[in-house]
Amino acid sequence: MWSVLAPWLACRPAAVERPNLALIVVDTLRADHLRTYGYAREVGLEVDAWARGAAVFEDATSHSPWTKPSVATLLTSLEPKDHGVVDWDRRLNRDFVTLQSALGAAGYDTLAVVAHLAFDPDSNEFHHGWDQFDVSVWKGVGSPHLIATSDKVTDRALAGVEQSRGPWLLMAHYFDPHETYLERPKYPFGAREVDLYDAEVAATDAAIGRLLDGLPTNTVVALVADHGEEFGEHGGRAHTVTLYDEVLRVPWIVAGPGIQPQRVPGRVGLVDLAPTLLERLGQPIPPPFKGRPVPFSDGRFTVEPRPVFSETQRVKNRRSVVDGDYKAILDLNTGTVELYNVAHDPGEAADVASLRPKVVGRLEAELRARETDRWVVPSDVLGADEKELLEAMGYAMEPDQNSQQ
């Protein structure tokens, strides 16, 4: 890894007071369940107040509808087909250049506070490149599905940056909006599954508010989610299986020195987040990164349109692309293609594949061409104990099920 980093490290700026970076990742957070993105219910008020001084990307897409491949993309600026973390038995290659290894090599202290089994160092490789990788909010305490962890994530994150020599990179990963939803008496939205979800989002928002209040002003702060959640919009629930926008559309909000408050139209993919943040820190972008920084001038971002691809290989084997006004979803098991005019039908209610055969042909060709350019990673078989724990938490479902975590 260091031989790859060396050439561009020599070019990095020697700033006297380099900005810190806080990357806030909220598991299973739909963009459209935040006030910032137009939600009618009073959910996400702390984030909304902060976002008024930030750049709010109006249409951000995850490249996968579940945690491991999505977070791998956030950290490596590689899409799932390139980093290969596409199932539970695939570990992140420890030799990849990552956001944390790039900033660590540039002299940043790096700290991650995480609250998901997917980051467990005993069975995954996300901990490489971090000076500190804190799993204490759940490790040895209980399943993060069954305990509230958001306040603990904030406590550990603030303690970590307080002790840092600086500049620093913090990744704070919040898990509570992920099913199983806990009772939150402070947020009595109702008893439906979606009501309980919103209550979890509200509780997490309060914890994030404390984190935002405790960060120094010389900090670039980015808030994103790894994926969203289904509540029956297309007949399913949870996430992982489908590629509709309820599981792919996520918040992407950035604030910090030199960034003007703004709404940023245009669709972006999370593969571009790490390069965008490195550019805002004045750091060079490692050549292995495949994402591109969103163009920035005079304090404002401008999205350059290009296709955005997503995929899932757990339970179902599906690919999607949004290109211009249209989104195509290809099921590789059945060979069927769905087509939606997302410019006029953002809820993806009407499949127009039969009415637009030329568009279907073009987008299907784009998707199938990518299948010949995949990094094939040897499976790293999980042990019996790890499999048993995953099954107990609902992660080992049968292929014919319609929802997954």
Image: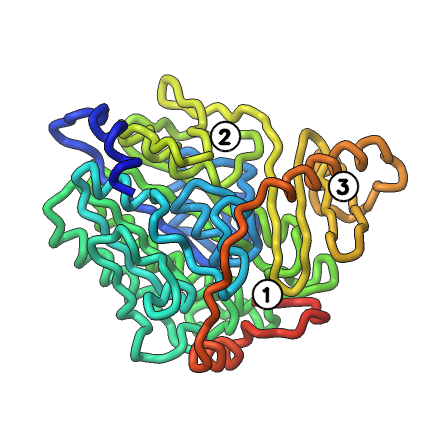
Closer to the eye: label 2 or 1: 2
Q: Quadrant of the N terminus?
A: top left
Note whether 235 is above or below 221 in the view shown. below
Note whether 385 is above or below 23 in the view shown. below
Camera sees residue 183: no
Circle 3 is placed at which residue position? 340
User: Closest to the observer: 46 or 19?
Assistant: 19
Note whether 87 is above or below 273 in the view shown. below
User: Closest to the observer: 337 or 287?
Assistant: 287
- Work out how far the residue at label 1 is from the one at label 3, CA to CA, in angstroms: 25 Å
Closer to the eye: label 1 or 3: 3
Q: Earlier in the sequence, mark 1 or mark 3?
A: 1
Camera sees residue 338: yes
Residue found at x 81% / y 46%? 350
Q: Residue 62: x percent and y percent?
A: 54, 46
Q: Amino acid at mark 1?
A: Val
Q: Image quadrant of residue 373?
A: top right
Q: Residue 53: x percent and y percent?
A: 36, 35
Specify whether 204 is left or right of 67: left
Circle 2 is placed at which residue position? 264
Number of marks in the rendered image: 3
Label 1 environment density (alpha carbons within 10 Å; few <14, some 14–19, many ≥20): some
Specify whether 329 is left or right of 223: right
Circle 1 is placed at which residue position? 194
